[in-house]
């Protein structure tokens, strides 16, 4: 379904973020060893901790691709250093 407006997308993202926060807050160390199976990797098992790392690192790879393309077009990409992001990370502001 295609959302009717950007406001609808923002509302859905906000709701999803709230659900994810509840799930993450309840996550225990033992949950990270839980085995996941995916039709994308038949016959292979993946620990939840490794899957969570994949979620984090996957988008980082795309950010580096965008930075490379931006440089090739004469632009100056922002820093992608995680430690710098932690210092200055924005807090979501919902209207």
Image (cartoon, rainbow, N blue to C red):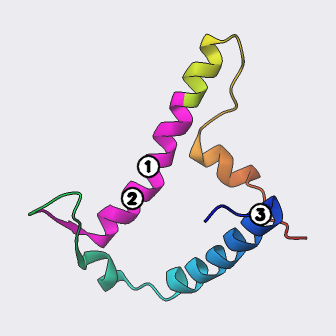
| On-image quarter of the N terminus | bottom right
Disc 3 and disc 1 in contact, CB within 8 angstroms: no
Q: Label 1, on which residue?
A: 57
**Residue pushed farthest bottom?**
26
Q: Label 2, on which residue?
A: 53
Q: Is residue 34 magenta?
A: no
Start-end of magenta stretch: 44-65
| Circle 1: element type | helix
Q: CA distance from mark 1 to mark 2?
A: 6 Å
11 vs 43: above or below = below
Q: Please indicate whether residue 86 sits to the left or right of residue 82 in the image.
A: right
Residue positioned 12% across, 62% down in the render: 44
Q: Please indicate whether residue 43 sits to the left or right of residue 80 in the image.
A: left
| Circle 2: element type | helix
Of labels 3 and 2, the one closer to you:
3
Q: Label 3, on which residue?
A: 4
Instruction: Indicate the position of residue 87 as horizontal and vertical percent values.
Output: 71, 52
Instruction: Indicate the position of residue 9 as horizontal and vertical percent values.
Output: 73, 64
**Residue pushed farthest left?**
43
Residue positioned 58% across, 20% down in the render: 69
């Amino acid at each position: 379904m295609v959302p009717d407006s950007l406001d609808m997308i923002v509302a859905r993202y906000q709701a999803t973020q709230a659900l994810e926060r509840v799930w993450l807050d309840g996550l225990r160390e033992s949950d990270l060893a839980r085995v996941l199976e995916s039709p994308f990797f038949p016959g292979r098992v993946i620990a939840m901790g490794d899957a969570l790392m994949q979620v984090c690192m996957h988008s980082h790879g795309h950010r580096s691709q965008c930075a490379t393309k931006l440089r090739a077009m004469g632009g100056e990409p922002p820093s992608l250093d995680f430690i710098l992001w932690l210092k200055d990370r924005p807090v979501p502001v919902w209207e």
